[in-house]
Amino acid sequence: MQSVMDDAKTRMKKALSALDKEFSKLRTGRASTSLVDDILVDYYGTPTPLKQIASVAIPDSRSITIQPWDRGAFGPIEKAIITSDLGLNPVNDGKLMRIAIPPLTEDRRKELVKVAKKYTEDCKVAIRNVRRDSNDTLKKMEKDKDISEDDQRRGQDEVQKITNQMVEQSDKQFKAKEAEIMEI
């Protein structure tokens, strides 16, 4: 029964870390290398992550610099950034590519909060799916006479406690991200 609890906790924590990863991609008013981490560049016919073909740096809170290791990569990198849905425009000077992070408008902030809310709801659905799987496993164990009916009930109560903690944690993460997005 303890292995069911441990498995549930581990899987729910993975859902929370996935939520963190999604939140890191959301653009706030500050520059962050995670904004461009997942951009795929068509590098000699192969989709390659940007961080594998260039160094990405943050010289100040409002800009990102990208320095490709191969001069031939400037065009594909610029095209990949422009076609991404980030709404960023790189400026290429031949040695370095600069991306200015414009301040967010009020409407854009509200849109980003809605997106963050959707990510949070997806995380909660994943947590609840883990709860359902764990409860099904406990019911199967009781049916196979591996545990008693009382143990099954206690196990389900414990799974519900873990679920409540994880849902509460996802709400805390959302509140923190919402405050970060709405900060001017």
Image (cartoon, rainbow, N blue to C red):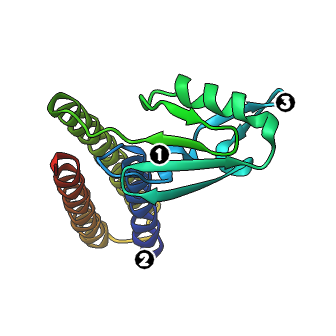
Q: Depth check: give the residue in front, 99 or 124.
A: 99
Amino acid type at circle 3 is Tyr
Q: Earlier in the sequence, mark 2 or mark 1?
A: 2
For the question of whether residue 140 can be seen, the reply is no
Q: How far is mark 2 from mark 1, CA to CA? A: 39 Å
Label 1 SS: helix
Quarter of the figure with the N terminus: bottom left
Q: Residues within 10 Å of mark 3 (few under 14, many from 20)?
A: few
Check the image and report above or below for 96 versus 3: above
**Residue 83 in view:** yes
**Which amino acid is tagged 1?**
Leu
Q: Which residue is mark 1?
A: 35
Please, is residue 152 above or below residue 44 in the view? Answer: below
What is the three-letter code of the residue carrying label 2?
A: Gln
Residue with the mark numbered 3: 44
Q: Residue at x 30, y 73 (%)?
A: 151
Q: Label 2 belongs to which residue?
A: 2
Q: Residue at x 55, y 57 (%)?
A: 57
**Mark 2: few/some/many CA within 10 Å (<14, 14-19, 20+):** few
Q: Secondary structure at mark 2?
A: helix
* Residue 88 on image: x %, y %: 45, 32
Give the x, y percent position of residue 99.
Answer: 49, 40
Q: Nearer the viewer, residue 49 or 138?
A: 49
Of circles 3 and 2, the one toward us is 3
